[in-house]
Image (tube, grey):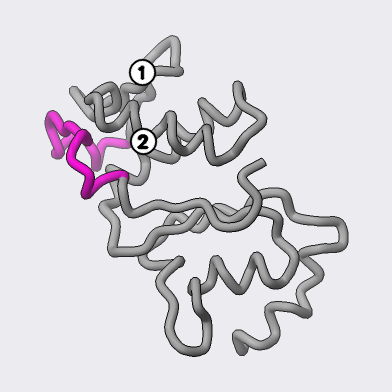
Amino acid sequence: MVLDQIRELGWDQPPVELLVLSVCRTAKGDKNAELGFAGLAVAAGVKSALASVWYVNDEGTLGLMTEFYTHLNHSQIKAEALRQAQLAMLRGEVGIAEGELRGTGADEAIVLPSVFGKIGHQNFSHPYYWAGFIMIGSPW
């Protein structure tokens, strides 16, 4: 697909409320796409896009996205849900320990696949894990 064809996808009929692009550099643009794929999606009718501006860590992204969706369930403002998730990461409330993802919203930790068992304890408070994500478009 050519990037120019994104506008033809019909993301505005009915409008896509939120497009989450949790992979690396989806908000990094160039002279042809100012805010990268996320910017093109908003230009094509997506109301809000959550994207990253640099190469992101998979485990940190798992923690941030899990926390984001937890907060999104309790907030009508998408940008506020992202802010709350980022603050939880900064405060060290989200991490991996003993093969489980632990965060603020879950009554119980989420048991991760065995491949994550090799990680051991991982704290995601460093901005590297959460600061590279931005909300583009409508914050609501």
Q: Residue at x 61, y 89 (%)?
A: 2
Q: Residue furthest right?
A: 13
**Residue 45's image quarter?**
bottom right
Q: Which mark is residue 109?
A: 1
In the image, residue 62 sits, relative to residue 91, either above or below, namely below
Task: Look at mark 2 in the image and give the residue it sits on.
Answer: 86
The label number, if any, that marks residue 132 in the structure image: none
Q: Residues within 10 Å of mark 1 (few under 14, many from 20)?
A: some
**Discs 2/1, front:** 2
**Which x, y percent locates residue 89?**
29, 31
SS for dot 2: helix
> What segment is highlighted magenta in the picture?
113-130
**Residue 117: percent from the left, percent from the top?**
19, 34
Placement of the C terminus among the 4 image quadrants:
top right
Q: Residues within 10 Å of mark 2 (few under 14, many from 20)?
A: many
Magenta highlight on residue 125: yes
Residue 108 in the image: state x and y as whole percent. 40, 12
- The residue positioned 30% from the left and 64% from the top of the image is 54
Q: x and y percent of residue 124 in the render?
A: 22, 36
- 2 or 1: tag closer to the N-terminus: 2
